[in-house]
Image (tube, grey):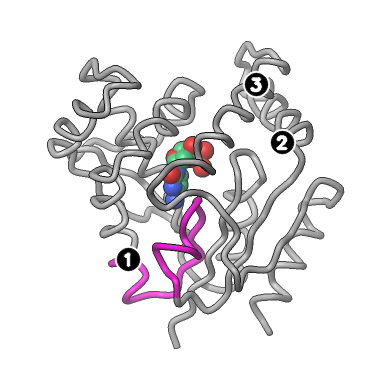
Amino acid sequence: MINTIAIDGPAGAGKSTIARRVAKKLNAIYVDTGAMYRAMALFLIRNGVARDDQEMIGVKCEEAEISIQFKDGEQQVLLNGENVNGLIRTEEVGNMASMSSTNPKVRQKLVELQRKLAESTSVVMDGRDIGTYVLPNASHKIYLTASVEVRARRRYEELLAKGEQCDLQQIAADIKERDERDMNREFAPLKQAEDAVLVDSSEMSLEEVEDKILSIAEQ
Ligand code: DC
């Protein structure tokens, strides 16, 4: 039987870490939809498209072919055939992705790819609109969130561990701005689906969140 688990929530809530672990336990494939929006954002940055030029974003996105492959169970995002996994985790790309993902043409293209992936195999898919729009009939839906302070601190520590220079206040401001945009865009905004279970991870450990989601998936 094909199982689909949708995990939505704001930036930095820990969705990808949790989704990856849950997928492993359930023998499902982890699909990171944010990485697809990031690959598209990288393409737009490389082509000199301004973050706020929606018309150009709509035109240029037609030239980007995004596909994914799995290597040792890890999703690899290909942008016009180039593996860009190592290039999309920067704040610059994340901020562009938050802007360009408001464009209906960008969304249409990537949602098609996401739905196809979930047709033939069990997936744990994370993003912003998976339970509300991409997979409205998902077997289980989770809305994973945490306070802005906790999310900013987690991202800050992640970046520090990678040796990147960063400023906690700036990260918190970026997160707030991104929440605002993701939640208020016209097309498929971030919101909790009516049938999603809310999990607030602000005061939970990784293991506690994982156990909670596994228990929901087993219901
Ligand atoms: O989860 P992330 O930080 O990698 O996502 C980057 C941006 O992509 C995020 O700000 C909004 C967008 N996104 C989206 O609009 N819909 C999704 N399903 C996933 C991500």
Amino acid type at circle 1 is: Arg
Mark-to-mark CA distance, 2 and 1: 28 Å
Question: Local crowd at mark 2 within 10 Å, few (<14), some, or many (≥20)?
Answer: many
Residue 70 location, quadrant: bottom left
54 relative position to 166: left or right: left
Up the image or down, 71 lies above or below 53; here it is below
**CB at disc 3 and ligand 1 closer than 8 Å:** no
Does residue 199 belong to the magenta stretch? no
Residues shaded magenta: 115-136
Residue 31 location, quadrant: bottom left
Q: Quadrant of the C terminus?
A: bottom right
Mark 3 or 1: in front is 3
The residue at which mark 1 appears reads as 115
Amino acid type at circle 3 is: Ala
The residue at which mark 2 appears reads as 151
Where is residue 141 drawn, in percent x and y? Answer: 58, 69
In the depicted view, which residue is nearer to us: 89 or 105? 105
- Dot 1 falls on a residue whose secondary structure is helix
Question: Local crowd at mark 3 within 10 Å, few (<14), some, or many (≥20)?
Answer: few
Up the image or down, 35 lies above or below 166; here it is below
Task: Name the residue rendered at 78%, 31% in the picture.
Answer: 149
118 relative position to 19: left or right: left
